[in-house]
DNA sequence: CTGAAAGCGCTTACAG
DNA sequence: CTGAAAGCGCTTACAG
């Protein structure tokens, strides 16, 4: 590894001068010296030692992407196509801003704080917050600027990018209502623990109310995650005497599971059961019938996160930044008219 | 941030002594002193400054996961479910070994070298190598121990974890032959640039040969990536006068695309066209019919990568470590007998 | 068992 | 325009 000192020696100047050339402080170096130094820098492909810089600046140019370890899924959150997409987008955008990206799965807030302090992390992004209690604690205790994705608490000073979940729930339910459905179910994880799911449920209620309806509790399926949860629900629906004619799912994977299970039980989708997903993730275009779903702008969300993060890094006192992204219905083939 | 110096001051000892306590050099500290120091360390939740450590040790405890930017897909490789899974597994395993994980998408080898040097990266993993030429250059020039996934060059000193691709190709073709198929196509990206695809193709040839057959060039579809490539191919197949009765794809997403396009053109899968994928990734269980595919042990691969990496970090002179993982056929519903 | 000194590679005031 | 000095937080020999 070539160091500033060696470059300085070869150029016959002080390390200070080399440093000034690197930082383009050209008022402090004569053009001739600068050029001579620059040639040597290029010759050795000199790159600065980030550890040394970090030690002085008390910063690191590292952004930590925080991924809660979810006990329900033994494996990393990165298995989720939405998470993969989000991480990929964030990495791309952050690299453009000359930040490095560390991925950190974690179980406890203490672990996060350790990482933030040991590396003097410049900024953190919480992706797929699981339990609200942990998210709240992290918001309060994070020692680096933090942007939370998909969660917002009114009563806490925080920074966040969310999606209009209530509108998402509303749009999907209304779409079904307009197609003539009246028996509309709701499939998702427990409503209690997550405000996101709760908001989508509220939107679903809103739409029903507009048509003078209320949710039928028998058709509200909770505590169901991912594909397995969807399949379980699909089997239950297939076995019902009085079935819903349509369901909305809080996640594409759940919708896929419902469709698979119902299809296997001999029901036809969408003729006998219409299904709407949420996320517009990869699988929604892969399955047949292609899934009608609520699309969120992942690239836009990532851009919002990076924008807020850059502001926070400049001014850590800032707080209360909240970007709420719009959602839209993507009509494909999993909904029929009645 | 609490520093060693502050801890030392409060304990009334030298920084050296605190350092020894932290590193469990208990022969160099009296038990009483150690305990007193430890209490203060705990009280302040002291964590070492990695930048300072890195500066001295010329190491970083950072492993870089290198993701080539593939121009075909504008977005990051992390969109690929296999990549997400691999990154997630590697992160989990590396964290257990007290390494931190940086994700680095890159276009040029120079970019990788810069990152490795600027952070004094301890080890690197190349995921989803795209062009063999870039992979070879990286193998030659990497300034940190490098493990390549899914690619091996006999003529280069390198370290790698691969999958028995030839066997994978063989298994899928033989499965179809045993089900009575004789008109078997092959769908994948260009064979030329990638040894992986080439090996799968060779395995496909092997199986055909056992049955006295040779590939029909009209049914070998190249230059096709991901779902779009699959759909394109599916449309071509649907439009053919003489169609294959089955195809093997080099990637689940391609298989999904073929199935979708053929289904939309009114063909039924598997009755009119049997399809086998490769990877056993998420979508294979999501689509209907569920995809028969070649499964690879991603967790095992990740474990192999970490194992080799740890050896290399201990002894950078080591080379030629190559783990080849077995593959197996996962039978689901996308293959019919003729 | 304990500590003073030197130094990792860089930047930040401060002098000239 | 250029440089000598101090110091970021830690560890590594070396003394006592």
Image (cartoon, coloured by chain):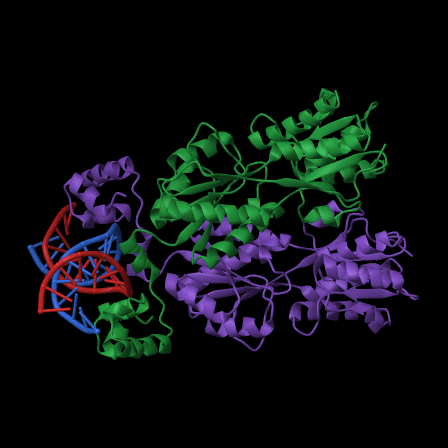
Chain colours: A green, B purple, C red, D blue
Q: Is residue B228 left or right of residue C8?
A: right
**Which x, y percent locates residue B146?**
48, 65
Q: Is residue B129 left or right of residue B314?
A: right
Looking at this view, name the residue that lies furthest to the front: A27
Q: Is residue B129 left or right of residue A139?
A: right
**Which x, y percent locates residue B325?**
62, 60
Q: Is residue B5 left or right of residue A149?
A: left
Q: Can residue B199 be seen from the camera position used here?
A: yes
- Is B250 located above or below residue A248 in the figure? below
Judge by depth and name the residue closer to the eye, A240 or B76. Answer: B76
The residue under the point 34% across, 74% down is: A41
The residue under the point 29% across, 42% down is: B46
**Which x, y percent locates residue A192?**
58, 25
Judge by depth and name the residue closer to the eye, A111 or A123. Answer: A123
- Is B280 located above or below residue A279 in the figure? below
**Tally of numbered tags:** 0
- Is B194 located above or below residue D6 in the figure? below
The residue under the point 63% across, 40% down is: A327
The residue under the point 68% across, 74% down is: B192
Quarter of the image with the N terminus of chain A is: bottom left
Quarter of the image with the C terminus of chain A is: top right
- Is D3 located above or below residue B293 in the figure? below
Judge by depth and name the residue closer to the eye, A235 or A160. Answer: A160
Q: Can residue B172 be seen from the camera position used here?
A: no
**Which x, y percent locates residue B81?**
63, 52
């Amino acid at each position: 590894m070539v160091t500033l000192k060696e470059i300085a020696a070869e150029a016959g100047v002080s390390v200070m001068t080399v440093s000034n050339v690197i930082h383009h402080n050209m008022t402090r170096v004569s053009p001739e010296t600068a050029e001579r130094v620059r040639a040597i820098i290029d010759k050795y492909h000199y790159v600065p030692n980030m550890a040394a810089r970090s030690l002085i600046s008390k910063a690191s140019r590292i952004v930590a992407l925080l991924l809660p370890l979810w006990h329900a899924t033994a494996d990393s959150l990165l298995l989720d196509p939405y998470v993969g997409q989000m991480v990929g987008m964030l990495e791309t955008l952050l690299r453009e801003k000359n930040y490095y990206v560390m991925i950190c799965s974690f179980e406890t807030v203490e672990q996060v704080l350790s990482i933030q302090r040991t590396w003097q992390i410049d900024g953190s992004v919480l992706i797929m917050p699981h339990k609200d209690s942990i998210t709240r604690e992290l918001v309060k205790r994070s020692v680096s600027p933090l942007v939370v994705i998909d969660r917002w608490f009114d009563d806490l000073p925080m920074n966040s990018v969310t999606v209009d979940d209530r509108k998402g729930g509303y749009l999907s339910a209304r779409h079904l209502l307009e197609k003539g459905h009246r028996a509309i179910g709701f499939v998702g994880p427990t409503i209690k623990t997550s405000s996101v799911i709760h908001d989508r449920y509220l939107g679903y209620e809103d739409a029903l109310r507009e048509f003078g309806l209320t949710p039928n509790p028998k058709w509200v399926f909770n505590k169901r995650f991912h594909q397995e949860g969807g399949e379980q629900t699909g089997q239950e629906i297939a076995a019902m005497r009085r079935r819903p004619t349509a369901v909305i799912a809080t996640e594409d994977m759940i919708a896929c599971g419902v469709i698979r299970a119902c299809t296997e039980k001999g029901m036809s989708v969408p003729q006998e059961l219409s299904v709407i997903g949420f996320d517009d993730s990869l699988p929604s275009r892969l399955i047949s019938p292609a899934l009608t779903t609520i699309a969120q702008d992942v690239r836009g969300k990532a851009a919002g996160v990076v924008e807020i993060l850059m502001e926070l890094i400049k001014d850590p006192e800032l707080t209360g930044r909240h970007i709420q992204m719009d959602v839209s219905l993507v009509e494909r083939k999993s909904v029929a008219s009645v």
